[in-house]
Image: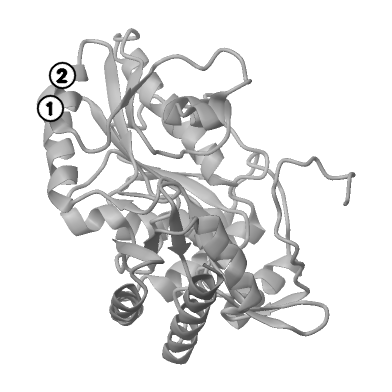
């Protein structure tokens, strides 16, 4: 056991030397079909040639200058995101956790600048996950995340998932915003119905509070739209972004309307590495590939194929599987056996999946996974289920 690394992860006994598309390979050359994509990060698979070219081309010119100076690649990526989303402004981070930190600061600074500094409370929901910073774990509020880390950052109101009566009852003169994931990832692939997200937008408008969405896991094409909230037809005030936007290179962002971002003036926030030329060059290429009707439609088509296959597996293995959740290529299988048993047995069948809460196994493949690879994944999932049945 390697004791030089802080033991905060229960790692699988697997190490990969290289990747290609939807496949990872060990030093011995054993191939594993990757249906986790680095937890929804490798949106275009491993070693994507276009992303490699974007990265190496920039690496040969300039890596880092800091935000003391203008960064043309950052400006270009920001313009791409503004032109294709609800947002008027973008701030680049290195991760979803950093995006959460800024989103919380932005909400509270907005009300402070309006002379309503008492409005600091942000409504969040059971089962949510917003990263592991002090603000992120306080926002989620689960004992699993907060236990042992001292007094939590105050100002978060935790409510049951998708209970509109409870939400309206909780809004008062201290309420600043509602923060929600359109699809809970770590929480077990729980999809917020479109009408519920519309209802939250209406509620925020009624009470003049901000709506912030966490699109870190469900954004960047994963649902068949660039962002999951687009399916409901609403526009948030703030959106947290990361994971898929960098295609595997560390990159995040906070998107915001001008009004919501109005308190974030010079000196109120910063990031040494955020929006560096390397990350933004890759992010530009990711958006150019993903944000086209043809590509997004292909995600929906592939989702249908996987879902159809999974429904067949549920019918065939009702003792192993209970239901399918999610949309696009953000899918979950709620298991009757322990989900960790399923994930670990999958290693034996050379398929990689990701566990989540509520005994769910997540399928978060590269968005450009092929039809042949989808069929192979379904075959390996069936082999895994069959092995668990036999083991009973």
Mark-to-mark CA distance, 2 and 1: 6 Å
Is residue 360 toward the left or the right of residue 171 in the image? Answer: right
Quarter of the image where one finds residue 46: bottom right
Q: Residue at coordinates 47% horizontally, 38% vertically from top-left?
A: 130
Nearer the observer, 321 or 172: 321
Q: In this view, does 329 lie above or below 158?
A: below
User: Coloring scheme of the render?
Assistant: one colour
Q: Is residue 171 above or below residue 372?
A: above
Judging by the rendered image, the residue that carries numbered circle 1 is 165
Is residue 8 toward the left or the right of residue 127 in the image? Answer: right
Q: Pinpoint residue 29: horizontal percent, then vertical percent.
A: 78, 85
* Residue furthest to the bottom: 372
Judging by the rendered image, the residue that carries numbered circle 2 is 169
> Would you say residue 342 is visible in this rendering?
yes
Quarter of the image where one finds residue 38: bottom right
- Across the whole image, how many numbered discs are drawn on residues? 2
Is residue 284 toward the left or the right of residue 223 in the image? Answer: right
Q: Pinpoint residue 297: horizontal percent, then vertical percent.
A: 28, 78
Q: Is mark 2 on a helix, strand or loop?
A: helix
Q: What element carries label 1?
A: helix
Q: Do the residues labelled 2 and 1 touch (CB within 8 Å)?
A: yes
Q: Residue at coordinates 48% horizontally, 36% vertically from top-left?
A: 100
Q: Pinpoint residue 372: horizontal percent, then vertical percent.
A: 46, 92
Nearer the observer, 115 or 120: 120
Q: How crowded is mark 1: few (under 14 residues within 10 Å), some or many (20 or more)?
A: few
Q: Residue at coordinates 50% horizontally, 31% vertically from top-left?
A: 136
Q: Residues within 10 Å of mark 2 (few under 14, many from 20)?
A: few
Q: Pinpoint residue 81: horizontal percent, then vertical percent.
A: 39, 57
């Amino acid at each position: 056991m390697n004791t030089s690394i802080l033991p905060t992860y229960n790692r699988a006994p697997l190490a990969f030397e290289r990747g290609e598309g939807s496949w990872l390979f060990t030093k011995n050359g054993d191939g594993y079909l990757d249906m986790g994509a680095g937890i929804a990060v490798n949106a275009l698979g491993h070693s994507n040639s276009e992303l490699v070219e974007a990265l190496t081309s920039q690496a040969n010119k300039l890596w880092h200058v800091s935000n003391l100076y203008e960064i043309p690649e950052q400006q270009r990526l920001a313009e791409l995101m503004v032109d294709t989303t609800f947002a008027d402004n973008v701030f680049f981070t290195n991760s979803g956790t950093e995006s959460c930190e800024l989103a919380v600061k932005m909400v509270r600074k907005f009300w402070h600048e309006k002379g309503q500094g008492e409005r600091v409370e942000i409504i969040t929901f059971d089962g949510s996950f917003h990263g592991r910073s002090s603000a992120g774990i306080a926002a989620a509020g689960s004992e699993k995340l907060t236990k042992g880390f001292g007094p939590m950052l105050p100002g978060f109101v935790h409510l049951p998932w998708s209970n509109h009566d409870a939400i309206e009852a909780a809004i008062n003169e201290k309420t600043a915003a509602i923060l929600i994931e359109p699809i809970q990832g770590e929480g077990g692939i729980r999809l917020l119905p479109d009408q519920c997200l519309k209802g939250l937008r209406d509620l925020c408008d009624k009470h003049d509070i901000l709506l912030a969405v966490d699109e870190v896991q469900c954004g960047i094409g994963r649902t068949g739209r660039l962002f999951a909230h687009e399916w409901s037809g609403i526009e948030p005030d703030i959106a947290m972004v990361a994971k898929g936007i960098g295609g595997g290179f560390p990159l995040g962002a906070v998107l915001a309307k001008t009004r919501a971002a109005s308190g974030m003036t010079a000196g109120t926030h910063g990031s040494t590495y955020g929006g560096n030329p390397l990350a933004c060059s890759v992010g530009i290429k990711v958006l150019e590939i993903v944000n086209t009707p043809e590509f997004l439609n292909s995600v929906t088509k592939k989702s249908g194929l996987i879902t159809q296959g999974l429904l067949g597996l549920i019918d065939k293995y009702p003792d192993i599987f209970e239901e399918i959740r999610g949309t696009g290529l953000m899918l979950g299988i709620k298991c009757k056996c322990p989900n960790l048993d399923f994930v670990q047995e999958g290693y034996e069948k050379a398929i990689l999946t990701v566990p989540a809460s509520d005994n769910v196994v997540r399928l978060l493949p590269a968005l450009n996974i092929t039809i042949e690879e989808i069929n192979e994944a379904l075959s390996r999932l069936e082999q895994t289920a069959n092995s668990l049945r036999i083991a009973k």
